[in-house]
Image (spheres, rainbow, N blue to C red):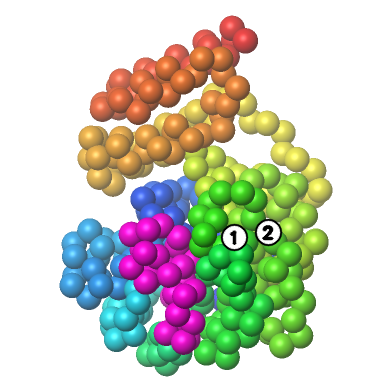
Amino acid sequence: MNIGNIDLGEKPVLLAPMEDVTDLPFRLLCKKFGADMVYTEFVSSDALIREVNKTMQKLKIVEEERPVAIQIYGKDTESMVQAAKMVENAKPDILDLNFGCPVKKVAGKGGGAGMLQNIPKMLEITSAVVKAVNIPVTVKTRLGWNDESKIIVTLAEQLQDCGIQALTIHGRTRAQMYTGQADWTLIGKVKENPRITIPIIGNGDITTPERAKECFERYGVDGIMVGRASFGHPWIFKEIKHYLQTGELLPDPGFEWKLNVLKQETLDSINRLDERRGIIHIRRHLAASPIFKNIPDFRRTRIEMLRADTVNDLFAILDSVPDKIEKI
């Protein structure tokens, strides 16, 4: 699969852009485990043109993570164009436009998935950004605003006509948020459309290697994007890539190995920020990790993890978990 001149290989597996998740250390970790392309946290165009320090920091990328995309969102054409030019100066491989974020603070103000209620403006912004920069522009969006307006098949053509070079589709409407199951049937319909020539990337509920393979085979997508399933589980990319290549599941590396990966992720977060902020940032990854699933009475341990405020306290809690497993 190619996006512009960027060759992502056959059946690429991408890391989704996620606020407060896909910072630089996490992107590098997922890259290490086989992610074919990574995306930054989404960036507000308004905050970017105001040069808000925290937002400007999100533009930092390094050579080791390439190919990398920076994603922006907003509802004003002029602001999006200005922000796009600033992003281009940061030298990412790709600029992605976020027309899919469903959270109230974004969609409720007309940005992200809110654009699904104003298609003319979405197309205006897309065309303007494509013309304003010299790097590939892509879009990430959803099936539609709600069940009564699943417009993605037509919208995909319109976005392609604006000049985008790839389209990622999350298989839910904005109204669904992240509830229910992702519906990939319309993603497949987009891919079946003979007018569509750009790569189509499917997103939503890719949680296992088997599901990844099924989505490629059943819906014919060019690539897949993994989001929430990477929380506390960055090695999922290695598992998926191995299964796609061999048809076999990787042997389980064991609890201690997985725990050490999460510890390293914690240290990377601390090194990027500081001990207090690094731990606050990483706790949601740890609490969501599937390695703790099915451990008896783990709720109490999870609460302790979420309250830990030093690396020594946190690691002491993590190191106590194997004893709980041995007692199962």
Compared to residue 160, the image places residue 275 above or below, namely: above
Please report the residue visible at 36 percent of the width from the left and 64 percent of the height from the top: 108
Residue on which disc 1 sits = 172
Give the amino acid at mark 2: Asp
Please report the residue visible at 62 percent of the width from the left and 10 percent of the height from the top: 328
Determine whether the residue tagged by mark 2 lies in a helix, strand or loop: loop
Task: State left or right for residue 218 relative to residue 129.
Answer: right
Compared to residue 302, the image places residue 55 above or below, namely: below
Residue on which disc 2 sits = 183
Please report the residue visible at 73 percent of the width from the left and 64 percent of the height from the top: 185
* Residue 187 shown in magenta: no
Residue 196 on image: x %, y %: 69, 84
Query: Is mark 1 in CB contact (under 8 Å) with mark 2?
Result: yes
Residue 206 on image: x %, y %: 64, 51
Q: Quadrant of the N terminus?
A: bottom right
Give the amino acid at mark 1: Arg
